[in-house]
Image: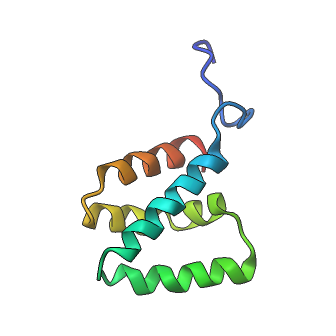
Amino acid sequence: MNDHTPDRYVTFLGIDCDAKADRMMEMLSARLASTDSPWVRYFEQKLAEKARMATDNLHFVGSQINSLYSFFEEAEDEEGLDLLWHLEHNCC
């Protein structure tokens, strides 16, 4: 790339996808704890599956991208949506 922006198809260096996925999981956990949305039960099940399969946070975010968008849209969480967009377009 000409603008020196890291190219995710060449390397993840400089993008810090794992830390951003960890942050997304922290945001998800905080939101789940503060809502009675039907999404809570859904994500409880998916997080239990994640634990059983021992997958990392980036894998979880990539696998649940549409559900996460719906949840953060419902919560009107712009910070969560922005981070999710960044993860989708740069890391997944």
Residue 46 drawn at (x, y percent): 55, 80
Residue 76, compared with residue 20, is above or below; it is: below
Residue 47 drawn at (x, y percent): 57, 78
Q: Quadrant of residue 2?
A: top right
Report the quarter where the N terminus lies: top right
Identify which residue, 34 or 6, lies in the foreground: 34
Identify which residue, 79 or 84, lies in the foreground: 79
Horizontal side of 32 relative to 46 (left or right) equals: left
Horizontal side of 90 relative to 71 (left or right) equals: right
Point 26% across, 67% down: residue: 74
Q: How is the image coloured?
A: rainbow
Point 27% across, 65% down: residue: 75
Horizontal side of 72 relative to 56 (left or right) equals: left
Residue 30 drawn at (x, y percent): 42, 67
Residue 65 drawn at (x, y percent): 48, 62
Horizontal side of 23 relative to 6 (left or right) equals: left
Residue 42, compared with residue 60, is above or below; it is: below
Identify which residue, 43 or 5, lies in the foreground: 43
Point 30% across, 50% down: residue: 78
Residue 36, compared with residue 57, is above or below; it is: below
Residue 29, compared with residue 13, is above or below; it is: below
Identify which residue, 37 or 7, lies in the foreground: 37
Q: How many marks?
A: 0
Point 74% across, 79% down: residue: 53
